[in-house]
C-alpha cells in the first residue's frame, strides 16, 4: 500500500528472450485499474536499460512517487519494456507484464 504523494520502490526485471542482442531501451512503469498493462495506463516513471545480450536479465528497484491527483483505490503495477518502440525486435507482443497490486490511500 502507499499514500498519494509518497515514494514507493518497484522491483522490476527485464529479460532479452530474443535471438539477438538488444540495444538500449526504456522501460515504462504503470498503474492500471485492470490487469492488462498498456501505454494508455498511467505511466508513473521509467528506467533505462543500456543493452541486453541474449538470455540476459536486468533487475533493479525503481523509486517512484504516487501522484497526488490519483484517486484512492487498488491499482495493478505493470511494466512495458521498450514502451516507445524504439528497439528493433522480432517479437513486439511480449513486452508488457502485470505485477502486484497497490492499494493507494
Image: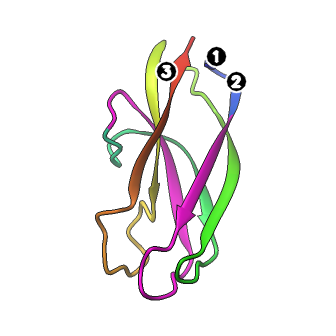
In the picture, the disc for residue 3 is 1
The residue pinned by badge 2 equals 6
For this view, does 74 lie left or right of residue 64? left
Quarter occupied by the C terminus = top right
For this view, does 67 lie left or right of residue 31? right
Asked where in the image residue 1 lies, by quadrant, the reply is top right
Span highlighted in magenta in the image = 9-35
Marks 2/3 in contact by CB < 8 Å: the verdict is no
Residue 37 vs residue 59, the one in the foreground: 59
Q: Which residue is the extreme one toward the bottom?
A: 20
In the picture, the disc for residue 30 is none
Residue 67, how many percent across, how many down? 57, 27
Residue 17 vs residue 4, the one in the foreground: 17
The answer to whether residue 102 is above or below residue 87 is above
Q: Is residue 26 magenta?
A: yes
Numbered disc 2: secondary structure: loop
Residue 99 vs residue 51, the one in the foreground: 99
Residue 16 vs residue 72, the one in the foreground: 16
Residue 15, how many percent across, how many down? 53, 67
Residue 30, how many percent across, how many down? 47, 41
For this view, does 57 lie left or right of residue 101? right
In the picture, the disc for residue 70 is 3
Marks 2/1 in contact by CB < 8 Å: the verdict is yes
Q: In percent of the image, x 54 and y 77: which residue is there?
A: 55
Amino acid at each position: 500500500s502507499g499514500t498519494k504523494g509518497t515514494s514507493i520502490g518497484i522491483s522490476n526485471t527485464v529479460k532479452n528472450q530474443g535471438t539477438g542482442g538488444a540495444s538500449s531501451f526504456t522501460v515504462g512503469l504503470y498503474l492500471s485499474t485492470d490487469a492488462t498493462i498498456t501505454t494508455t495506463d498511467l505511466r508513473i516513471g521509467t528506467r533505462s536499460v543500456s543493452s541486453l545480450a541474449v538470455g540476459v536479465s536486468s533487475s533493479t528497484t525503481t523509486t517512484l512517487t504516487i501522484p497526488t491527483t490519483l484517486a484512492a483505490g487498488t491499482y495493478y503495477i505493470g511494466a512495458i519494456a521498450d514502451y516507445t518502440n524504439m528497439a528493433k525486435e522480432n517479437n513486439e507482443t511480449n513486452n508488457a507484464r502485470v505485477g502486484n497490486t497497490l492499494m493507494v490511500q
